[in-house]
Image (tube, rainbow, N blue to C red):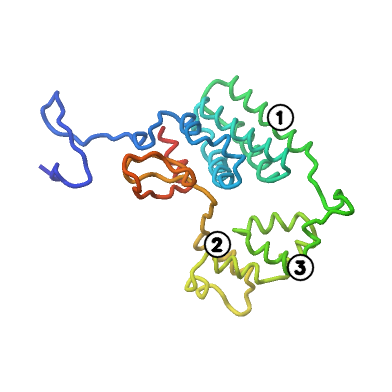
Amino acid sequence: MGRDWRAPGETWVRTPHTNGWERSKLRPIQFIGCTSISEAFHRLDLTRGVSDVRRFGYIAKVVEILVQEKVQNLSGNARKSLVGILTAIVLRSSEEDVHTSTARDLVQQFGQALEGHVCGSPQLASRHQHTANSLLDVISDRQPKTVLSADENSTTFLDLPREILSLVLRRLPDDRSLLETAKAHEALQNIIDRESHLWQSLCEFHFTPSQIDHRKTPEKTWRKTFFELKKYFGIREVYADLIHICCHCKALFWKTFGHPCLRPGSPSVRVTPQQFVDMLIYL
């Protein structure tokens, strides 16, 4: 008979036409409770979540994965929802003067992905391309605030003591944030280039002592050590808020807000942006 049909972890059902047994084909959408990507975006409120500083990093990473790898696999409706999130990111970037480079990169990558073969009508793809160009114009027209444009009597970030600046920079979560900050002003560039303890802190945050000992040598700088460790082991994904999946009811929810589970206090598991995107592709 082969494998026992009562084996744990599998569900078998009787087939009426043969009176035999076959493995149940469970659809992965059942645990998410949605039937489409656009519905998942709507239920998790990703568009409005862009304005939440805690959720922005997670949503931006989800969008980055989608525009880099999955645009050609998305339906026209799903792309429309993605355009809505991109629009929200661009508007927040232009209004609050934050995450400008992130918004620009996401829109550019989305526009480039549309140039290839995509699902849906050519007219819809053309409209999405036009929207991407318009969003790019919005970002390009926005002039970022600089130290020179500040009021003479106001206190800027660079007026803080160097020790305070270093402490703030040590709070940045990854190398990308450090390098983007270095582009803002030459004073920050000098701090990031010359103070090795910033890169040492990154190494100690993202990697274990044994991993660091494996790659660090006296003649190797902490900056070079970090990028070698990143290449071999990858870095931790850190988000102020992220999506969880309940182990009882299988609902997806933002950890900060929780969800009305039938069993209060049920444990949940974190869902990384890549895992979330993989779930969406099955919808």
Query: In the visual, does 9 lie left or right of 152?
Result: left
Residues under labels 2 and 3: Cα distance?
28 Å
Q: Amino acid at mark 2?
A: Lys
* Dot 3 crowding, Cα within 10 Å, few <14, some 14–19, many 20+: few
- x and y percentages locating residue 113 in the rendered image: 59, 35
Tag 1: amino acid: Ser
Alpha carbon of mark 2 to alpha carbon of mark 1: how far? 36 Å
Circles 2 and 1: CB atoms closer than 8 Å: no
Residue for badge 1: 134
Q: Decide: is 208 above or below 52.
A: below
Q: Residue at x 56, y 40 (%)?
A: 63
The residue that appears at 63% across and 61% down in the rendered structure is 171
Name the element at disc 3. Answer: helix
The residue that disc 3 covers is 162
Q: Is residue 227 positioned above or below 213 on the image?
A: above
Instruction: Label 2, secondary structure: give it.
Output: helix
* Label whose residue precedes the other's in the sequence (2 or 1): 1
User: In the depicted view, which residue is nearer to us: 101 or 173?
Assistant: 173
Viewer-nearest of discs 2 and 3 = 3
Q: Residues within 10 Å of mark 1 (few under 14, many from 20)?
A: some
